[in-house]
Image: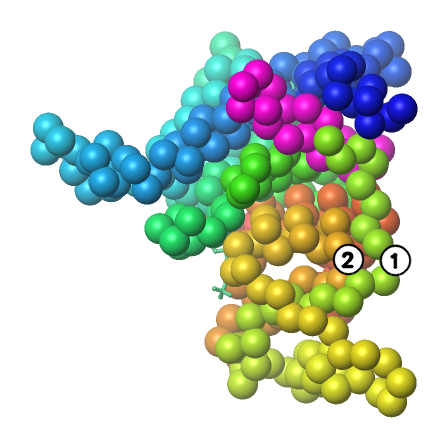
């Protein structure tokens, strides 16, 4: 049985990516190495998030520790771990993180051909009440990485070669796509390994859930307000949709992938281009959604084809 095979013939994330790699004889294993460093970052954040409540109590994190030393906040700590892991992989040339004002250009001796854009700990305002949070990442391939420049990182989402997220929830789940479908891996804490638990995720064709911060409704434009109104008061004969909103993008997107429906953070009068960050939040999630058979729109066009303004 398939379920039995999954239980005894453990498909770790490394084994999975190595299998994929063997289908491309020209591949040099660089992505496998890069991914193992991303996985290390995710395991570190998972373990820190699990300890967050306790650590606060005994003074391991938060403002000061028992020695009275200033301690790093979880999102800053997570960022440091990801940056160091990615740089030391020797496979990256540019890193763009939500936590850092400026992009990181990897020193020449450690440069590789990938550019990684990421949000190391998204939804961090949810940490203190134990709600699921996550890491989001997207990967671009840079042709000439000898002289990396910022515009090599500011590419449209359709140029990404891989994307994923890791959700720190009731279990720790890493969802990954390298452009041929989407797979979900769950961390087995006793093994310290991510095991394939959700092979070939496809979003259900129809969904009964809509997910949006309705507290912003006053500032929405007409079509957005009308759409949400229709979720609640559908035309004669159809049932209203259920509302689910966690306020943590990774968890809201994860539920949407598995149960179907729609997640939206529309632009409004207050934030005319929406709240979510295009490069390391919206592009990776759109990549995954499309790979799972879903769609991602800005409201006007396909997300992945939008261009980013070059802001330095
Ligand atoms: P953050 O990057 O500051 O954590 O904010 C991003 C988060 C997303 O995870 C989530 O979808 C959104 O903010 C929720 O925003 P709001 O509280 O306005 O509904
Ligand atoms: Mg974020």
Within-10-Å neighbours for mark 2: few <14, some 14–19, many 20+: many
245 vs 234: above or below:
above
**SS of the residue under disc 2:** loop
Residue depicted at x 62% and y 65%: 244
Q: Position of residue 19 (x, y in %)?
A: 81, 15
Residue depicted at x 73% and y 27%: 196
Residue denoted by label 2: 260
Residue denoted by label 1: 205
Q: Mark 2 touching mark 1, by CB under 8 A?
A: yes
Residue depicted at x 76% and y 15%: 8
Question: In the image, is residue 195 part of the stretch drawn in magenta?
Answer: yes
19 vs 156: above or below:
above
The numbered mark at residue 215 is none
Question: In the image, is residue 297 part of the stretch drawn in magenta?
Answer: no
Residue 22 visible here = yes
Q: Position of residue 143 (x, y in %)?
A: 71, 25
- Quadrant containing the N terminus is top right
Q: Which residues are magenta?
A: 178-196
**SS of the residue under disc 1:** loop
89 vs 187: above or below:
above
């Amino acid at each position: 049985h398939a379920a039995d095979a999954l239980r005894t013939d453990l498909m770790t994330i490394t084994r999975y990516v190595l299998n994929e790699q063997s289908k491309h004889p020209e591949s040099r294993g660089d992505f496998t190495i890069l991914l193992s460093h991303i996985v290390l970052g995710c395991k570190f954040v998972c373990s820190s998030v699990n300890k967050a409540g306790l650590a606060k109590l005994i003074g391991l994190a938060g403002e000061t520790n028992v020695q009275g030393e200033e301690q790093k906040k979880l999102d800053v700590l997570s960022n440091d771990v990801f940056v160091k892991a990615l740089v030391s992989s020797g496979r990256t040339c540019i890193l763009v993180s939500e936590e850092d004002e400026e992009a990181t250009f990897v020193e020449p001796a450690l440069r590789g051909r990938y550019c990684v854009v990421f949000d190391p700990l998204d939804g961090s305002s949810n940490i203190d009440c134990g709600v699921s949070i996550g890491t989001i990442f997207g990967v671009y391939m840079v042709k000439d990485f000898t002289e990396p420049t910022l515009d090599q990182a500011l590419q449209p989402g359709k140029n990404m070669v891989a994307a994923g997220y890791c959700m720190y929830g009731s279990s720790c789940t890493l969802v990954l796509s390298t452009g041929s479908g989407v797979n979900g891996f769950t961390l087995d804490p006793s093994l310290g390994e991510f095991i394939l638990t959700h092979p070939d995720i496809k979003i259900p064709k129809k969904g009964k859930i809509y997910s949006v911060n309705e507290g912003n409704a006053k500032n929405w434009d007409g079509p957005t307000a009308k759409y949400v109104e229709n979720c609640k008061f559908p035309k004669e004969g159809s049932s209203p949709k259920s509302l689910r909103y966690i306020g943590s993008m990774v968890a809201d997107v994860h539920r949407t992938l598995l149960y179907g429906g729609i997640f939206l953070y529309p632009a409004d009068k207050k934030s005319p281009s929406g709240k979510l960050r295009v490069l390391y939040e919206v592009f990776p999630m759109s990549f995954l959604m499309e790979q799972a058979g879903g769609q991602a729109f800005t409201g006007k066009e396909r997300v992945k084809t939008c261009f980013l303004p070059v802001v330095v």
